[in-house]
Amino acid sequence: MSERVERGRGRGDVDDYEQHGGFPVYRATEDDGGPDFGRLVEALRTIQDLGVSTAPPPDVVRRAAEQAEALVALLEPHRVPEGQQPGGRSMGLPGRGSLLMMPWTVEKFDATGVRSTGVFRRFHMGGNGAAHGGTLPLLFDDLFGMITHAYGRPISRTGYLHVNYRKITPIDTRLTVEGQVDRVDGRKTFVSARLVDAEGTLLADCEALMVVLLPGQP
Ligand SMILES: CCCCCCCC(=O)SCCNC(=O)CCNC(=O)[C@H](O)C(C)(C)COP(=O)(O)OP(=O)(O)OC[C@H]1O[C@@H](n2cnc3c(N)ncnc32)[C@H](O)[C@@H]1OP(=O)(O)O
């Protein structure tokens, strides 16, 4: 991905990252967390699934709480500042190894657009087997960040994001999201994307405005 980062630069209005605002460009790696980081993240996601889909007896709850607290104690001494943790920067892992982002896999990443596939998991569920409505903007917003970056635009933030929920988005079902830059107007980058199932049925579409940050803007 660092290669992609380099390739993306220079196409925007400002190719010097010192000249505009926003967060620093963090170095992205394939396996910054080492060979077991993917296992850890996947186990933590499964714990999130189990946390919302099990009803264990009290003694199991007590033991699970003790083990969870032991894991917290193990990891706690290793906190690092933003940009130094592998979570969110491990480009070889689903969702870049982030517990916040959808654990999806990027299939296409270039200036013509970005495509990603994956499933909404049990812990993403809102009700009746459907993904929570708030998880779709997260999926689209993260995709738009990648699209903007792949297009070579300077660091931008989302000005607005409009989702049309066309059909129920099922959990535990492989889906595809794909989008692209539609138009650039000064600091404004207009982007759009579609979420479809394996048959190509449109589940949701989204359009958004990404605004290039000015120097000093956070
Ligand atoms: C390349 C890496 C990509 C990373 C992607 C990260 C994705 C994210 O999730 S970011 C988090 C969510 N977003 C935020 O927190 C943003 C919070 N808002 C802000 O910081 C500011 O409002 C910001 C920077 C977007 C715009 O503020 P400001 O710099 O004052 O710009 P402003 O002059 O108001 O707007 C610039 C242009 O955009 C337009 N615009 C801005 N917001 C909107 C909006 N909501 N609707 C319509 N137009 C808008 C303005 O009309 C203006 O247009 P024009 O140049 O034609 O007059």
Image: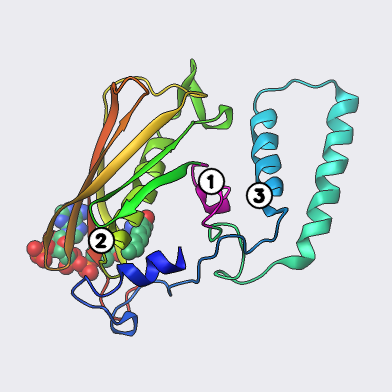
Which one is earlier in the sequence, the residue at label 2 or at label 3? Answer: 3
Q: Is residue 83 above or below residue 202?
A: below
Residue drawn where x is 64% and y is 31% of the image = 49
Q: Nearer the viewer, residue 189 or 7?
A: 7
Q: Callout 3: helix, strand or loop? A: helix
* Crowd around label 1: few <14 · some 14–19 · many ≥20 (10 Å): many
Q: Is residue 20 above or below residue 154?
A: below
Look at mark 2 in the image and give the residue it sits on.
151
- Residue 110, located in which quarter of the rendered image? bottom left
**Magenta stretch: dominant SS?**
loop
Which quarter of the frame holds ligand 1?
bottom left
Let me know if residue 143 is in the magenta part: no
Q: What separation in Å lies between label 1 and label 3 (alpha carbons)?
A: 9 Å
Look at mark 3 in the image and give the residue it sits on.
38
Task: Give the side of residue 154 with respect to residue 198, left or right.
Answer: left
- Determine whether label 2 and label 1 are within 8 Å by CB: no
Give coordinates of residue 12: x percent, y percent.
Answer: 21, 71
Task: Give the side of residue 26 with respect to residue 197, left or right.
Answer: right
Residue drawn where x is 51% and y is 48% of the image = 95
- Determine whether label 1 and label 3 are within 8 Å by CB: no
Magenta-highlighted residues: 91-103
Q: Quadrant of the C terminus?
A: bottom left
Look at mark 1 in the image and give the residue it sits on.
94
- Residue 147, located in which quarter of the rendered image? bottom left
Give coordinates of residue 148: x percent, y percent.
Answer: 28, 59
Which one is earlier in the sequence, the residue at label 1 or at label 3? Answer: 3
Give coordinates of residue 146: x percent, y percent.
Answer: 35, 55
Q: Amino acid at mark 2?
A: Tyr
Q: Callout 2: helix, strand or loop? A: loop
